[in-house]
Protein backbone atom coordinates (compact mmCIF):
# COMPACT_ATOMS: atom_id res chain seq x y z
CA UNK A 1 0.00 0.00 0.00
CA UNK A 2 2.58 2.49 -1.10
CA UNK A 3 1.83 6.11 -1.89
CA UNK A 4 2.57 5.61 -5.55
CA UNK A 5 -0.08 2.99 -5.92
CA UNK A 6 -2.71 5.42 -4.71
CA UNK A 7 -1.96 8.31 -7.06
CA UNK A 8 -4.05 7.19 -9.99
CA UNK A 9 -6.49 5.09 -8.00
CA UNK A 10 -10.10 5.83 -7.10
CA UNK A 11 -8.94 6.40 -3.51
CA UNK A 12 -7.39 9.77 -4.32
CA UNK A 13 -8.93 12.44 -2.11
CA UNK A 14 -10.12 10.03 0.58
CA UNK A 15 -8.96 10.16 4.18
CA UNK A 16 -6.18 7.68 5.04
CA UNK A 17 -8.39 5.64 7.35
CA UNK A 18 -10.97 5.34 4.60
CA UNK A 19 -8.30 4.35 2.13
CA UNK A 20 -7.04 1.57 4.39
CA UNK A 21 -10.53 0.26 4.87
CA UNK A 22 -11.29 0.34 1.17
CA UNK A 23 -7.92 -1.11 0.40
CA UNK A 24 -8.50 -4.11 2.63
CA UNK A 25 -11.76 -4.70 0.87
CA UNK A 26 -9.99 -4.77 -2.45
CA UNK A 27 -7.87 -7.85 -1.59
CA UNK A 28 -9.03 -11.02 -3.27
CA UNK A 29 -8.69 -14.57 -2.09
CA UNK A 30 -7.74 -17.10 -4.69
CA UNK A 31 -7.84 -20.83 -4.29
CA UNK A 32 -4.92 -22.50 -5.99
CA UNK A 33 -5.74 -26.15 -5.69
CA UNK A 34 -6.35 -28.72 -4.22
CA UNK A 35 -6.81 -30.04 -7.75
CA UNK A 36 -5.21 -27.70 -10.18
CA UNK A 37 -3.36 -28.70 -13.35
CA UNK A 38 -0.36 -26.54 -12.50
CA UNK A 39 0.33 -27.91 -9.04
CA UNK A 40 1.13 -31.44 -10.31
CA UNK A 41 -0.27 -33.02 -7.20
CA UNK A 42 -2.97 -32.46 -4.68
CA UNK A 43 -2.22 -29.63 -2.34
CA UNK A 44 -3.94 -26.35 -1.75
CA UNK A 45 -2.70 -22.79 -1.56
CA UNK A 46 -5.05 -20.06 -0.46
CA UNK A 47 -3.55 -16.94 -1.95
CA UNK A 48 -4.35 -13.44 -0.81
CA UNK A 49 -3.94 -11.22 -3.84
CA UNK A 50 -3.79 -7.53 -4.39
CA UNK A 51 -4.65 -7.40 -8.05
CA UNK A 52 -1.86 -9.37 -9.68
CA UNK A 53 0.42 -9.41 -6.67
CA UNK A 54 0.49 -12.17 -4.08
CA UNK A 55 0.35 -10.72 -0.56
CA UNK A 56 0.24 -13.97 1.34
CA UNK A 57 -0.24 -17.67 0.87
CA UNK A 58 -1.64 -20.24 3.22
CA UNK A 59 -0.78 -23.83 2.50
CA UNK A 60 -2.87 -26.87 3.20
CA UNK A 61 -1.26 -30.27 2.83
CA UNK A 62 -2.27 -33.79 3.67
CA UNK A 63 -4.72 -34.58 0.87
CA UNK A 64 -3.03 -37.87 0.08
CA UNK A 65 -1.76 -38.71 3.54
CA UNK A 66 -1.66 -42.51 3.78
CA UNK A 67 -0.24 -43.04 7.27
CA UNK A 68 2.84 -44.90 6.04
CA UNK A 69 4.65 -44.42 9.33
CA UNK A 70 1.79 -46.06 11.19
CA UNK A 71 1.39 -48.87 8.65
CA UNK A 72 5.13 -49.54 8.88
CA UNK A 73 4.77 -50.32 12.57
CA UNK A 74 2.89 -53.50 11.68
CA UNK A 75 4.99 -54.71 8.78
CA UNK A 76 8.10 -56.84 8.60
CA UNK A 77 11.05 -54.85 7.33
CA UNK A 78 10.99 -56.23 3.80
CA UNK A 79 7.35 -55.26 3.27
CA UNK A 80 8.09 -51.61 3.94
CA UNK A 81 9.91 -51.29 0.63
CA UNK A 82 6.58 -51.02 -1.16
CA UNK A 83 5.64 -48.07 1.05
CA UNK A 84 8.80 -46.21 0.11
CA UNK A 85 7.94 -46.60 -3.61
CA UNK A 86 4.97 -44.38 -3.12
CA UNK A 87 6.79 -41.49 -1.55
CA UNK A 88 8.65 -39.80 -4.38
CA UNK A 89 7.14 -41.83 -7.20
CA UNK A 90 9.26 -40.05 -9.81
CA UNK A 91 12.38 -41.77 -8.48
CA UNK A 92 11.20 -44.86 -6.60
CA UNK A 93 14.46 -46.86 -6.89
CA UNK A 94 16.31 -44.26 -4.80
CA UNK A 95 13.72 -44.63 -2.04
CA UNK A 96 13.93 -48.43 -2.26
CA UNK A 97 17.71 -48.49 -2.07
CA UNK A 98 17.72 -45.98 0.77
CA UNK A 99 15.41 -48.21 2.74
CA UNK A 100 17.43 -51.36 2.00
CA UNK A 101 20.60 -49.61 3.14
CA UNK A 102 18.93 -48.53 6.38
CA UNK A 103 17.89 -52.09 7.11
CA UNK A 104 21.32 -53.41 6.18
CA UNK A 105 22.91 -50.91 8.55
CA UNK A 106 20.65 -52.14 11.35
CA UNK A 107 21.22 -55.82 10.60
CA UNK A 108 24.92 -55.44 9.90
CA UNK A 109 24.72 -56.97 6.43
CA UNK A 110 27.65 -56.24 4.13
CA UNK A 111 26.62 -55.81 0.51
CA UNK A 112 29.03 -57.03 -2.19
CA UNK A 113 30.64 -54.50 -4.49
CA UNK A 114 28.77 -55.62 -7.60
CA UNK A 115 25.39 -55.10 -5.94
CA UNK A 116 26.49 -51.68 -4.74
CA UNK A 117 27.47 -50.69 -8.28
CA UNK A 118 24.19 -51.96 -9.71
CA UNK A 119 22.38 -49.93 -7.07
CA UNK A 120 24.33 -46.84 -8.03
CA UNK A 121 23.36 -47.36 -11.68
CA UNK A 122 19.69 -47.72 -10.79
CA UNK A 123 19.73 -44.74 -8.44
CA UNK A 124 21.35 -42.50 -11.01
CA UNK A 125 18.86 -43.62 -13.67
CA UNK A 126 16.13 -42.71 -11.23
CA UNK A 127 17.70 -39.32 -10.65
CA UNK A 128 17.75 -38.68 -14.38
CA UNK A 129 14.09 -39.71 -14.67
CA UNK A 130 13.22 -37.41 -11.77
CA UNK A 131 15.07 -34.41 -13.12
CA UNK A 132 13.76 -34.94 -16.67
CA UNK A 133 10.24 -34.66 -15.34
CA UNK A 134 10.94 -31.64 -13.19
CA UNK A 135 12.79 -29.67 -15.82
CA UNK A 136 10.53 -30.49 -18.72
CA UNK A 137 7.37 -29.78 -16.69
CA UNK A 138 8.91 -26.46 -15.71
CA UNK A 139 9.23 -25.73 -19.40
CA UNK A 140 5.59 -26.75 -19.90
CA UNK A 141 4.51 -24.41 -17.13
CA UNK A 142 6.22 -21.56 -18.90
CA UNK A 143 4.43 -22.49 -22.10
CA UNK A 144 6.92 -24.70 -23.94
CA UNK A 145 5.37 -28.12 -24.50
CA UNK A 146 7.70 -29.39 -27.20
CA UNK A 147 10.76 -30.04 -25.06
CA UNK A 148 8.69 -32.10 -22.68
CA UNK A 149 7.62 -34.41 -25.49
CA UNK A 150 11.22 -34.72 -26.68
CA UNK A 151 12.60 -35.99 -23.37
CA UNK A 152 9.58 -38.04 -22.34
CA UNK A 153 10.76 -40.90 -24.57
CA UNK A 154 13.89 -41.10 -22.42
CA UNK A 155 11.92 -41.44 -19.24
CA UNK A 156 10.05 -44.22 -20.99
CA UNK A 157 13.41 -45.78 -21.85
CA UNK A 158 14.49 -45.61 -18.20
CA UNK A 159 11.21 -47.22 -17.18
CA UNK A 160 11.98 -50.05 -19.59
CA UNK A 161 15.30 -50.55 -17.80
CA UNK A 162 13.41 -50.69 -14.50
CA UNK A 163 11.09 -53.24 -16.05
CA UNK A 164 14.09 -55.30 -17.03
CA UNK A 165 15.47 -55.12 -13.48
CA UNK A 166 12.35 -55.67 -11.40
CA UNK A 167 9.31 -56.06 -13.65
CA UNK A 168 7.64 -52.84 -12.57
CA UNK A 169 7.75 -49.37 -13.99
CA UNK A 170 6.58 -46.76 -11.52
CA UNK A 171 6.34 -48.33 -8.08
CA UNK A 172 9.39 -50.46 -8.55
CA UNK A 173 9.95 -52.32 -5.27
CA UNK A 174 13.45 -52.88 -6.59
CA UNK A 175 16.24 -54.69 -4.80
CA UNK A 176 16.22 -56.61 -1.57
CA UNK A 177 17.78 -56.22 1.79
CA UNK A 178 21.26 -57.60 1.09
CA UNK A 179 21.59 -56.75 -2.58
CA UNK A 180 19.54 -56.95 -5.74
CA UNK A 181 16.92 -59.57 -6.56
CA UNK A 182 18.55 -60.31 -9.92
CA UNK A 183 21.73 -59.48 -11.74
CA UNK A 184 21.94 -56.97 -14.54
CA UNK A 185 20.67 -58.87 -17.56
CA UNK A 186 22.19 -58.55 -21.03
CA UNK A 187 19.10 -56.70 -22.16
CA UNK A 188 19.36 -54.27 -19.26
CA UNK A 189 23.00 -53.57 -20.05
CA UNK A 190 22.12 -53.07 -23.71
CA UNK A 191 19.38 -50.60 -22.80
CA UNK A 192 21.63 -48.70 -20.41
CA UNK A 193 24.26 -48.54 -23.15
CA UNK A 194 21.69 -47.12 -25.56
CA UNK A 195 20.82 -44.51 -22.95
CA UNK A 196 24.46 -43.59 -22.48
CA UNK A 197 25.00 -43.31 -26.23
CA UNK A 198 21.85 -41.55 -27.31
CA UNK A 199 20.43 -39.66 -24.35
CA UNK A 200 23.10 -36.91 -24.43
CA UNK A 201 21.89 -35.87 -27.88
CA UNK A 202 18.29 -35.82 -26.62
CA UNK A 203 19.25 -33.79 -23.57
CA UNK A 204 21.21 -31.31 -25.69
CA UNK A 205 18.18 -31.00 -27.95
CA UNK A 206 15.98 -30.22 -24.95
CA UNK A 207 18.48 -27.79 -23.47
CA UNK A 208 18.96 -25.98 -26.75
CA UNK A 209 15.21 -25.43 -26.89
CA UNK A 210 14.90 -24.10 -23.38
CA UNK A 211 18.15 -23.13 -21.71
CA UNK A 212 18.97 -19.93 -23.60
CA UNK A 213 15.41 -19.27 -24.68
CA UNK A 214 14.65 -15.59 -24.09
CA UNK A 215 11.06 -16.20 -22.98
CA UNK A 216 12.05 -18.99 -20.63
CA UNK A 217 14.86 -16.91 -19.13
CA UNK A 218 12.58 -13.93 -18.63
CA UNK A 219 10.03 -16.13 -16.92
CA UNK A 220 12.51 -17.79 -14.56
CA UNK A 221 15.49 -15.56 -13.76
CA UNK A 222 15.07 -13.86 -10.36
CA UNK A 223 11.75 -15.63 -9.87
CA UNK A 224 11.19 -17.40 -6.56
CA UNK A 225 14.70 -16.71 -5.32
CA UNK A 226 15.86 -17.72 -1.86
CA UNK A 227 19.15 -16.89 -0.20
CA UNK A 228 21.50 -19.59 1.06
CA UNK A 229 20.91 -18.57 4.70
CA UNK A 230 17.14 -18.77 4.41
CA UNK A 231 17.37 -22.01 2.45
CA UNK A 232 19.47 -23.61 5.19
CA UNK A 233 17.15 -22.27 7.87
CA UNK A 234 14.22 -23.78 6.01
CA UNK A 235 15.95 -27.15 5.84
CA UNK A 236 16.42 -27.16 2.07
CA UNK A 237 18.43 -30.03 0.66
CA UNK A 238 19.16 -31.38 -2.78
CA UNK A 239 19.07 -29.36 -6.01
CA UNK A 240 17.04 -26.57 -4.40
CA UNK A 241 19.72 -25.95 -1.77
CA UNK A 242 22.54 -26.31 -4.26
CA UNK A 243 20.87 -23.74 -6.53
CA UNK A 244 21.21 -21.29 -3.63
CA UNK A 245 24.94 -21.95 -3.56
CA UNK A 246 25.47 -24.53 -0.80
CA UNK A 247 27.36 -27.58 -2.01
CA UNK A 248 25.68 -30.09 0.29
CA UNK A 249 25.19 -33.43 -1.42
CA UNK A 250 24.79 -36.59 0.65
CA UNK A 251 26.54 -38.61 -2.06
CA UNK A 252 29.68 -36.52 -1.68
CA UNK A 253 29.51 -35.78 2.04
CA UNK A 254 28.49 -39.17 3.46
CA UNK A 255 29.14 -41.58 0.61
CA UNK A 256 27.01 -44.71 0.64
CA UNK A 257 26.88 -47.66 -1.74
CA UNK A 258 30.42 -46.99 -3.05
CA UNK A 259 29.77 -43.44 -4.26
CA UNK A 260 33.30 -42.64 -3.12
CA UNK A 261 34.58 -44.73 -6.06
CA UNK A 262 33.11 -42.41 -8.66
CA UNK A 263 34.33 -39.16 -10.02
CA UNK A 264 31.55 -36.59 -10.24
CA UNK A 265 30.96 -32.95 -9.55
CA UNK A 266 28.34 -31.28 -7.39
CA UNK A 267 26.90 -28.39 -9.41
CA UNK A 268 25.87 -25.29 -7.48
CA UNK A 269 24.00 -22.15 -8.44
CA UNK A 270 24.39 -18.62 -7.16
CA UNK A 271 21.03 -16.92 -6.70
CA UNK A 272 18.71 -19.76 -5.75
CA UNK A 273 16.09 -18.67 -8.26
CA UNK A 274 14.02 -20.79 -10.59
CA UNK A 275 16.52 -20.59 -13.42
CA UNK A 276 19.35 -21.75 -11.11
CA UNK A 277 17.28 -24.69 -9.96
CA UNK A 278 16.68 -25.59 -13.60
CA UNK A 279 20.38 -25.36 -14.40
CA UNK A 280 21.46 -27.38 -11.35
CA UNK A 281 19.05 -30.17 -12.24
CA UNK A 282 20.19 -30.08 -15.84
CA UNK A 283 23.83 -30.36 -14.86
CA UNK A 284 23.07 -33.14 -12.39
CA UNK A 285 21.73 -35.24 -15.24
CA UNK A 286 25.09 -34.94 -16.99
CA UNK A 287 26.87 -35.93 -13.78
CA UNK A 288 24.52 -38.89 -13.36
CA UNK A 289 25.36 -40.05 -16.86
CA UNK A 290 29.03 -39.79 -15.96
CA UNK A 291 28.50 -41.92 -12.84
CA UNK A 292 26.50 -44.55 -14.75
CA UNK A 293 29.22 -44.76 -17.37
CA UNK A 294 31.90 -45.28 -14.73
CA UNK A 295 29.84 -47.84 -12.83
CA UNK A 296 29.03 -49.83 -15.94
CA UNK A 297 32.63 -49.82 -17.19
CA UNK A 298 34.08 -50.82 -13.82
CA UNK A 299 31.32 -53.21 -12.82
CA UNK A 300 33.04 -55.71 -10.49
CA UNK A 301 32.56 -59.43 -10.89
CA UNK A 302 31.04 -61.43 -8.10
CA UNK A 303 27.70 -62.09 -6.44
CA UNK A 304 24.89 -59.57 -6.71
CA UNK A 305 23.65 -60.13 -3.19
CA UNK A 306 25.05 -60.70 0.26
CA UNK A 307 25.37 -64.17 1.74
CA UNK A 308 22.75 -63.49 4.41
CA UNK A 309 20.27 -66.38 4.37
CA UNK A 310 18.33 -65.01 7.32
CA UNK A 311 17.41 -61.85 5.49
CA UNK A 312 17.85 -62.39 1.75
CA UNK A 313 15.12 -64.42 0.03
CA UNK A 314 16.63 -67.54 -1.56
CA UNK A 315 16.29 -68.17 -5.26
CA UNK A 316 13.10 -69.87 -6.36
CA UNK A 317 14.86 -72.98 -7.72
CA UNK A 318 16.62 -73.36 -4.37
CA UNK A 319 13.30 -73.06 -2.55
CA UNK A 320 11.86 -75.95 -4.57
CA UNK A 321 14.87 -78.23 -4.20
CA UNK A 322 16.56 -77.40 -0.94
CA UNK A 323 15.04 -77.77 2.51
CA UNK A 324 17.09 -75.01 4.19
CA UNK A 325 16.18 -72.58 1.47
CA UNK A 326 12.50 -73.48 1.88
CA UNK A 327 12.71 -72.88 5.63
CA UNK A 328 14.39 -69.53 5.19
CA UNK A 329 11.95 -68.55 2.46
CA UNK A 330 9.04 -69.38 4.73
CA UNK A 331 10.51 -67.57 7.71
CA UNK A 332 11.29 -64.42 5.76
CA UNK A 333 7.97 -64.29 3.95
CA UNK A 334 6.00 -64.83 7.15
CA UNK A 335 8.06 -62.12 8.79
CA UNK A 336 9.39 -64.39 11.50
CA UNK A 337 12.87 -62.94 11.46
CA UNK A 338 13.39 -60.59 14.37
CA UNK A 339 15.41 -57.45 13.83
CA UNK A 340 18.06 -56.58 16.41
CA UNK A 341 17.43 -53.86 18.96
CA UNK A 342 18.83 -50.56 17.77
CA UNK A 343 18.33 -47.09 16.44
CA UNK A 344 19.66 -46.22 13.05
CA UNK A 345 19.53 -43.17 10.81
CA UNK A 346 20.52 -43.44 7.21
CA UNK A 347 20.11 -40.90 4.47
CA UNK A 348 20.52 -40.95 0.72
CA UNK A 349 20.48 -38.21 -1.87
CA UNK A 350 16.99 -38.50 -3.29
CA UNK A 351 15.69 -36.68 -6.32
CA UNK A 352 14.70 -33.74 -4.16
CA UNK A 353 17.31 -33.87 -1.43
CA UNK A 354 18.28 -35.73 1.67
CA UNK A 355 15.90 -38.63 2.07
CA UNK A 356 16.37 -39.97 5.57
CA UNK A 357 15.09 -43.03 7.40
CA UNK A 358 15.13 -43.04 11.18
CA UNK A 359 14.40 -46.57 12.32
CA UNK A 360 13.91 -47.52 15.96
CA UNK A 361 13.77 -51.25 16.50
CA UNK A 362 12.79 -52.87 19.80
CA UNK A 363 13.82 -56.33 18.67
CA UNK A 364 10.49 -57.21 17.08
CA UNK A 365 9.64 -57.97 13.49
CA UNK A 366 8.31 -54.58 12.63
CA UNK A 367 9.93 -51.24 13.42
CA UNK A 368 8.96 -49.73 16.74
CA UNK A 369 9.05 -46.34 15.09
CA UNK A 370 9.96 -45.35 11.58
CA UNK A 371 10.34 -41.72 10.61
CA UNK A 372 10.81 -40.71 7.04
CA UNK A 373 12.69 -37.49 6.49
CA UNK A 374 11.01 -36.28 3.32
CA UNK A 375 12.82 -33.38 1.69
CA UNK A 376 9.64 -32.04 0.02
CA UNK A 377 7.69 -31.74 3.22
CA UNK A 378 10.44 -29.68 4.78
CA UNK A 379 11.29 -27.29 1.98
CA UNK A 380 7.73 -26.71 0.80
CA UNK A 381 7.25 -24.60 3.96
CA UNK A 382 9.32 -21.87 2.36
CA UNK A 383 6.91 -21.50 -0.55
CA UNK A 384 4.88 -18.51 0.82
CA UNK A 385 8.06 -16.64 1.59
CA UNK A 386 9.41 -17.31 -1.88
CA UNK A 387 6.34 -16.09 -3.77
CA UNK A 388 5.37 -13.09 -1.66
CA UNK A 389 5.24 -9.99 -3.84
CA UNK A 390 5.34 -11.90 -7.11
CA UNK A 391 2.54 -12.71 -9.52
CA UNK A 392 0.44 -15.82 -9.83
CA UNK A 393 2.27 -17.01 -12.93
CA UNK A 394 5.58 -16.70 -11.03
CA UNK A 395 4.15 -18.73 -8.17
CA UNK A 396 3.28 -21.56 -10.57
CA UNK A 397 6.78 -21.55 -12.02
CA UNK A 398 8.36 -21.45 -8.56
CA UNK A 399 6.32 -24.38 -7.36
CA UNK A 400 7.13 -26.35 -10.46
CA UNK A 401 10.86 -25.76 -10.11
CA UNK A 402 10.84 -26.77 -6.42
CA UNK A 403 9.59 -30.18 -7.58
CA UNK A 404 7.06 -30.70 -4.83
CA UNK A 405 5.85 -34.30 -5.13
CA UNK A 406 2.56 -34.88 -3.32
CA UNK A 407 3.44 -38.46 -2.41
CA UNK A 408 6.55 -37.35 -0.62
CA UNK A 409 4.89 -34.33 0.91
CA UNK A 410 2.20 -36.29 2.70
CA UNK A 411 3.65 -39.80 3.10
CA UNK B 1 35.82 -32.87 16.55
CA UNK B 2 34.76 -36.25 17.87
CA UNK B 3 31.53 -37.38 19.44
CA UNK B 4 33.33 -37.62 22.76
CA UNK B 5 34.42 -33.99 22.59
CA UNK B 6 30.88 -32.85 21.83
CA UNK B 7 29.43 -34.88 24.70
CA UNK B 8 32.07 -33.61 27.15
CA UNK B 9 31.55 -30.03 26.06
CA UNK B 10 27.79 -30.25 26.45
CA UNK B 11 28.02 -31.84 29.90
CA UNK B 12 30.53 -29.18 30.96
CA UNK B 13 28.24 -26.43 29.71
CA UNK B 14 24.85 -27.66 30.92
CA UNK B 15 25.70 -30.08 33.73
CA UNK B 16 25.01 -33.76 34.14
CA UNK B 17 21.45 -33.10 35.26
CA UNK B 18 20.56 -31.65 31.89
CA UNK B 19 22.69 -33.71 29.51
CA UNK B 20 22.51 -37.45 30.06
CA UNK B 21 21.85 -40.71 28.27
CA UNK B 22 24.93 -40.27 26.10
CA UNK B 23 25.21 -43.19 23.71
CA UNK B 24 26.57 -43.83 20.26
CA UNK B 25 24.32 -45.66 17.80
CA UNK B 26 26.08 -46.74 14.63
CA UNK B 27 28.53 -43.87 15.04
CA UNK B 28 25.83 -41.29 15.68
CA UNK B 29 25.94 -39.45 19.01
CA UNK B 30 22.69 -39.42 20.99
CA UNK B 31 22.15 -37.21 24.02
CA UNK B 32 19.07 -36.73 26.14
CA UNK B 33 18.09 -33.42 27.61
CA UNK B 34 15.24 -31.77 29.48
CA UNK B 35 12.47 -29.44 28.37
CA UNK B 36 14.06 -26.52 30.19
CA UNK B 37 17.39 -26.99 28.47
CA UNK B 38 16.36 -27.71 24.89
CA UNK B 39 16.10 -24.12 23.63
CA UNK B 40 19.36 -22.87 25.25
CA UNK B 41 21.04 -26.06 24.08
CA UNK B 42 19.93 -25.53 20.48
CA UNK B 43 21.13 -21.93 20.56
CA UNK B 44 24.41 -22.98 22.13
CA UNK B 45 25.04 -25.60 19.47
CA UNK B 46 24.06 -23.14 16.74
CA UNK B 47 26.42 -20.42 17.93
CA UNK B 48 29.28 -22.64 19.02
CA UNK B 49 32.46 -21.49 17.21
CA UNK B 50 33.61 -24.99 16.23
CA UNK B 51 30.56 -27.27 16.43
CA UNK B 52 28.22 -25.12 14.30
CA UNK B 53 25.18 -27.37 14.40
CA UNK B 54 23.21 -25.06 12.15
CA UNK B 55 21.03 -27.43 10.18
CA UNK B 56 17.94 -29.14 11.55
CA UNK B 57 17.60 -32.33 9.56
CA UNK B 58 14.49 -33.71 11.18
CA UNK B 59 12.28 -33.68 14.21
CA UNK B 60 9.83 -36.35 15.21
CA UNK B 61 7.84 -37.75 18.09
CA UNK B 62 7.92 -41.17 19.68
CA UNK B 63 5.65 -42.92 22.17
CA UNK B 64 6.65 -45.35 24.97
CA UNK B 65 3.36 -46.27 26.68
CA UNK B 66 5.08 -48.66 29.10
CA UNK B 67 7.30 -45.99 30.62
CA UNK B 68 5.02 -43.43 32.30
CA UNK B 69 7.94 -41.31 33.53
CA UNK B 70 8.93 -40.47 29.99
CA UNK B 71 6.03 -41.53 27.87
CA UNK B 72 6.44 -39.18 24.92
CA UNK B 73 9.68 -38.24 23.29
CA UNK B 74 10.81 -35.68 20.78
CA UNK B 75 13.84 -36.53 18.67
CA UNK B 76 15.86 -33.76 17.04
CA UNK B 77 18.35 -34.55 14.29
CA UNK B 78 21.02 -31.90 13.95
CA UNK B 79 23.70 -31.71 11.33
CA UNK B 80 26.84 -29.63 11.36
CA UNK B 81 27.39 -29.15 7.64
CA UNK B 82 30.81 -27.58 8.12
CA UNK B 83 32.20 -30.48 10.14
CA UNK B 84 29.89 -33.10 8.64
CA UNK B 85 28.90 -34.41 12.06
CA UNK B 86 25.40 -35.43 13.01
CA UNK B 87 23.85 -35.32 16.46
CA UNK B 88 20.59 -36.63 17.84
CA UNK B 89 19.02 -34.88 20.81
CA UNK B 90 16.12 -36.46 22.64
CA UNK B 91 13.84 -35.21 25.32
CA UNK B 92 10.98 -36.89 27.12
CA UNK B 93 7.77 -35.61 28.65
CA UNK B 94 4.95 -37.26 30.56
CA UNK B 95 1.34 -37.54 29.47
CA UNK B 96 0.23 -35.08 32.18
CA UNK B 97 2.73 -32.44 31.23
CA UNK B 98 3.03 -32.85 27.49
CA UNK B 99 4.46 -29.44 26.61
CA UNK B 100 7.78 -28.80 24.91
CA UNK B 101 9.16 -25.36 24.05
CA UNK B 102 9.26 -24.65 20.34
CA UNK B 103 12.47 -24.11 18.40
CA UNK B 104 10.79 -22.32 15.50
CA UNK B 105 12.53 -19.15 16.68
CA UNK B 106 15.82 -20.68 15.62
CA UNK B 107 14.84 -22.94 12.71
CA UNK B 108 12.08 -21.94 10.33
CA UNK B 109 11.80 -25.54 9.15
CA UNK B 110 10.79 -26.70 12.65
CA UNK B 111 7.35 -25.22 12.05
CA UNK B 112 5.79 -28.11 10.12
CA UNK B 113 7.90 -30.73 11.84
CA UNK B 114 6.48 -29.68 15.20
CA UNK B 115 2.99 -29.53 13.78
CA UNK B 116 3.46 -33.08 12.54
CA UNK B 117 4.60 -34.24 15.98
CA UNK B 118 1.52 -32.57 17.47
CA UNK B 119 -0.75 -34.07 14.85
CA UNK B 120 0.43 -37.62 15.38
CA UNK B 121 1.43 -37.69 19.04
CA UNK B 122 -0.36 -34.75 20.64
CA UNK B 123 2.89 -33.22 21.81
CA UNK B 124 2.24 -29.51 22.37
CA UNK B 125 4.93 -27.01 21.47
CA UNK B 126 4.62 -23.84 23.52
CA UNK B 127 5.25 -20.65 21.60
CA UNK B 128 4.60 -22.25 18.20
CA UNK B 129 3.01 -19.78 15.75
CA UNK B 130 0.28 -22.17 14.61
CA UNK B 131 -0.19 -25.31 16.68
CA UNK B 132 -2.72 -27.07 14.45
CA UNK B 133 -3.04 -30.40 12.73
CA UNK B 134 -1.25 -30.63 9.43
CA UNK B 135 -1.64 -33.97 7.68
CA UNK B 136 -4.77 -35.34 9.33
CA UNK B 137 -8.29 -33.96 9.14
CA UNK B 138 -8.91 -30.94 11.32
CA UNK B 139 -11.87 -32.46 13.16
CA UNK B 140 -10.00 -35.58 14.23
CA UNK B 141 -10.17 -35.98 18.01
CA UNK B 142 -7.20 -38.29 18.64
CA UNK B 143 -3.54 -38.55 17.82
CA UNK B 144 -3.17 -41.62 15.64
CA UNK B 145 0.50 -42.54 16.03
CA UNK B 146 0.09 -43.19 19.74
CA UNK B 147 0.51 -46.84 20.50
CA UNK B 148 -2.95 -47.22 22.04
CA UNK B 149 -4.50 -46.92 18.59
CA UNK B 150 -3.99 -50.22 16.82
CA UNK B 151 -3.44 -50.13 13.11
CA UNK B 152 -6.07 -52.68 12.31
CA UNK B 153 -9.68 -52.74 13.39
CA UNK B 154 -9.66 -54.33 16.84
CA UNK B 155 -13.10 -55.86 16.35
CA UNK B 156 -12.00 -58.02 13.44
CA UNK B 157 -11.48 -61.66 14.31
CA UNK B 158 -9.67 -62.59 11.10
CA UNK B 159 -6.75 -60.33 11.88
CA UNK B 160 -5.79 -61.30 15.41
CA UNK B 161 -2.11 -61.55 16.22
CA UNK B 162 -2.16 -65.32 16.80
CA UNK B 163 -3.02 -65.95 13.17
CA UNK B 164 0.10 -64.11 12.12
CA UNK B 165 2.38 -65.94 14.53
CA UNK B 166 2.81 -62.82 16.59
Image: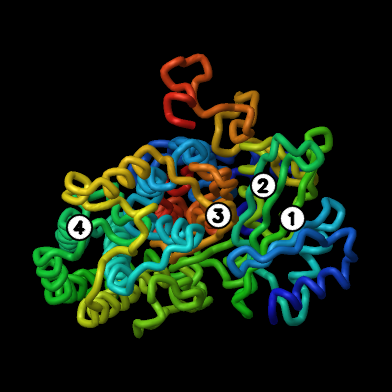
Query: What chain is tagged by disc 4?
Result: A
The residue at which mark 2 appears reads as B114
Q: Where residue B30 appears, x then y in whole percent?
A: 69, 62
Tag 4 and tag 1 share a subunit: no
Mark 4 nearby-residue class (10 Å; few <14, some 14–19, many ≥20): many
Q: In this orientation, which residue lies closer to the viewer: A389 or B19?
A: B19
- Kindly check if marks 2 and 1 are in contact, taking CB atoms under 8 A apart as contact: yes
Q: Alpha-carbon neighbours of circle 1 within 10 Å: few (<14), some, or many (≥20)?
A: many
Image x and y of residue A66, in percent: 45, 36
Query: CA–CA distance between discs 2 and 4?
Result: 39 Å
Residue at horizontal 35 percent and vertical 85 percent from the top: A263
- Asked if badge 3 and badge 4 are on a common chain, one would say yes
In the rendered view, does B26 fall on the left or right side of A152?
right
The residue to which callout 3 is attached is A358
* One can see residue A394 in this view: no
Residue A165, disc: 4
Left or right: residue A310 versus residue A4 is: left
Give whichever of discs 2 and 1 has the lower sequence position: 1
Q: Could you say whether the residue bearing mark 3 is in a helix, strand or loop?
A: strand
Label whose residue precedes the other's in the sequence (3 or 4): 4
According to the image, label 1 marks what residue? B103
Amino acid sequence: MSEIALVSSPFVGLEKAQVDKKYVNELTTLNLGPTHPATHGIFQNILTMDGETIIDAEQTVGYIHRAFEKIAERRPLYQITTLTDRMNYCSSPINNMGWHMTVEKLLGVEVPKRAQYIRVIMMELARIADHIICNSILAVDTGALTGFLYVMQWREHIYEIYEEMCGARLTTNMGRCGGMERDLSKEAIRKIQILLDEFPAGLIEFESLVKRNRIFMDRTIDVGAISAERALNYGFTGPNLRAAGVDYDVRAMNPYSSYEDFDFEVPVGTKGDTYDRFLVRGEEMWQSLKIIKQALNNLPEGPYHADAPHYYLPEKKEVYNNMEALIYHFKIVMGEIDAPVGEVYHSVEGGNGELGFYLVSDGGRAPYRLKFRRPCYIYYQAFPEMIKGSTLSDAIVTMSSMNVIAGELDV
Amino acid sequence: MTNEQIAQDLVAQFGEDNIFGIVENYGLLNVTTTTDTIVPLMHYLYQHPTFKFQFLTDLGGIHFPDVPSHEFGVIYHLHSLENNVRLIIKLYVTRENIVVPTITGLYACANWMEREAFDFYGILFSGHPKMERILNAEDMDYHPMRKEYPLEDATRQDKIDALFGR
